[in-house]
Image: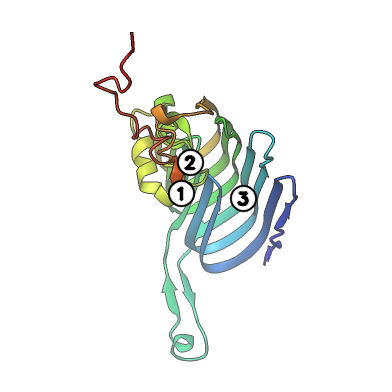
Amino acid sequence: MAVPGPILPGTSAYPNGYSISNATFNFEQSVQGNGYHMSYIYAKAGGTAMKNYAHGSGSLDSEATLTWQHVTEKTHNVYSDYFDHYQDCIQFKEDVAMVYAPMRIAVGTGYYAANPLDYSSLLKERTEAKNYFAGTQMIHEIEYAHAIDKELDLVVKDKINYTYDPELLAVGYTQMRVNEDVTDGKVHIGVLQANDNILGYLSPCGSRCGANKSPDYGKFLGSPSNDISWKGYIWRDPAIEIDEDYWGTYHIEKNMTLEVPYKVSCKKDDWLPCCFAGFDDMNTLDKKAFKSATGVFDCTCFKAPTVAQFPRVY
């Protein structure tokens, strides 16, 4: 029986420019039975995501938990530098035993009650973790198996501190632990970690902050909404690449952990930045509201004189 926990969002804002938002979700599941099963679990928090998919016919004995958390804390005090803090965490645990068997299942009271459905599906389960900000991907997959006895523990999280100087400090953490016995099946294990040169482009500031002085967390190149581009970048000369396939009957134990710290500082001029394109990144509405800034702070009004306007008097 699935027992999902409640979503508990908490948001508060104060006059001094401080706000905090904290949302959590807890999911517990216990399933035992015989027949055909199919399950799909997907969770995304900030720049972290995980997916679990399974199906097959036969007997099933499964215990699973999912914990999801997203925290946003912002301090936008007019008398000091702005500071944003983001923290995302997803944890998935599973203890499952499956044995394949062809099944005939009568459904309802009509035609299929008198003519049971035949299910003959070998066992499959795939678990995938992605840490977009850290450029990390881990995959564990079992296919065409006749029996699976597995314990899996997955954690994917990130922590980001961002000041509007801007300076960005971040840590991406991903761990997958597996202890399993697989009978007459195929096991695939994969790990991919982007190199340091690519991480700059996956961040909300990164090496592009000189051109984009208003980075927006959650809309950077490595976001889940731009998964195709993220995969293209992470595959370019990866720092770590693991690709393993096992056919047959195996006992496998894996403990894979990747912790990726990241820091970037992009200072900018606070006063009269016209010659450094400071006016160009001003909000369009602000440009309209402050029309007097046009022609002054974008330096377009300046023309080098060719003739002295006031000749010197001797």
Q: Is residue 148 left or right of residue 233?
A: right
Screen quadrant of the N terminus: bottom right
- Of mark 3 and mark 1, the one earlier in the sequence is 3
The image's mark for residue 132 is: 2
Measured as percent of width and height from the top left, residue 142 is found at 45, 48
Residue at 50% x, 82% y: name it: 107
Report helix, strand or loop for mark 1.
helix
Q: Is residue 246 left or right of residue 88?
A: left
Measured as percent of width and height from the top left, residue 116 is found at 45, 81
Residue type of the residue flagged with mark 1: Pro
Residue at 33% x, 40% y: name it: 232
- For this rendering, which residue is in front, 138 or 220? 220
Report helix, strand or loop for mark 3.
strand
Considering every residue shown, the one lying at the far top of the view is 314
The image's mark for residue 94 is: 3
Badge nearest the viewer, 3 or 2: 2
Residue type of the residue flagged with mark 2: Tyr
Callouts 3 and 1 close, C-beta under 8 Å: no
Residue named by callout 1: 224
The image's mark for residue 263 is: none
Q: Is residue 241 visible?
A: no
Q: Is residue 247 visible?
A: yes
Q: Is residue 35 left or right of residue 3?
A: left
Callouts 1 and 2 close, C-beta under 8 Å: yes
- Of mark 3 and mark 2, the one earlier in the sequence is 3
Residue count near mark 3 (Cα–Cα under 10 Å), binned few <14, some 14–19, many ≥20: some
Callouts 3 and 2 close, C-beta under 8 Å: no
The quadrant holding residue 28 is: bottom right
User: What is the CA distance from the residue labelled 3 to the residue labelled 1?
Assistant: 24 Å
